[in-house]
């Protein structure tokens, strides 16, 4: 059974503090993978002094063979904005790894050099046995609920209904 772990903002601060000393280079840009990478990406961009911020939104269609689904890029910067840049890619969690690895491949195809960072790495769920994030703050098998995901908007209604 998967254990649910609800994080506080203090927990997120600790994870960010764990990540910061790991970065081995300076970056030309930071790419936040939506939606999970937006909050940690904003915090890291401030801490690292990165002002060139990009976003990537990737959707995988679900269905019978969802693990084989081809991604749709809902938002992605043009190649000219990426070419010859060193880019730190940030997301909240590496579960299957499909989303962040898809972003990495697209960045490389544009002629840039990506490095991948997540708050939580779940190696047991990863579809990529020969790949992992370059940087991560914690390893877990738990279902992580970040403070920006709780009791707001639709989540408040789901919580009230006992769903989630």
Image: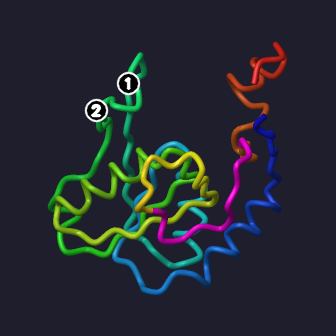
Which secondary structure lies at badge 1?
loop
Check the picture and name the quadrant holding the N terminus. top right
Q: Is residue 38 magenta?
A: no
Q: Position of residue 117 (x, y in %)?
A: 51, 65
The front one of 131 and 52 is 131
Check the picture and name the quadrant holding the C terminus. top right
Residue 141 horizontal side relative to residue 128, left or right: right
Q: Is residue 141 magenta?
A: yes
Q: Which residues are magenta?
A: 132-143
Q: Find residue 20 and report its image quarter.
A: bottom right
Q: Find residue 112 and report its image quarter.
A: bottom left
Q: Which residue is mark 1?
A: 61
Q: Earlier in the sequence, mark 1 or mark 2?
A: 1
Q: Which residue is mark 2?
A: 70
In the rendered image of this protein, does residue 100 appear above or below residue 135?
above
Q: Position of residue 11 (x, y in %)?
A: 80, 61
* x 26%, y 74%: residue: 85
The front one of 55 and 121 is 121
């Amino acid at each position: 059974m998967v254990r649910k772990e609800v994080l506080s903002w203090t927990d997120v601060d600790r994870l960010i503090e764990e990540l910061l000393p790991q970065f081995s280079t300076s970056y030309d840009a930071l790419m936040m993978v939506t939606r999970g990478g937006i909050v940690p990406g904003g915090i890291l961009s401030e801490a690292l002094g990165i002002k060139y911020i990009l976003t990537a939104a990737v959707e995988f269609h679900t269905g019978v063979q969802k693990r084989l689904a081809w991604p749709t890029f809902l938002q992605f910067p043009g190649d000219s904005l990426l070419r010859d840049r060193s880019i730190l890619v940030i997301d909240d969690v590496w579960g299957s790894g499909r989303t962040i690895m898809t972003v990495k491949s697209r960045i490389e195809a544009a002629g840039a050099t990506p490095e991948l960072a997540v708050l939580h790495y779940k190696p047991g769920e990863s579809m990529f046995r020969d790949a992992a994030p370059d940087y991560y703050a914690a390893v877990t098998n738990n279902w992580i609920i970040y403070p920006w995901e709780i009791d707001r908007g639709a989540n408040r209604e789901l919580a009230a209904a006992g769903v989630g």
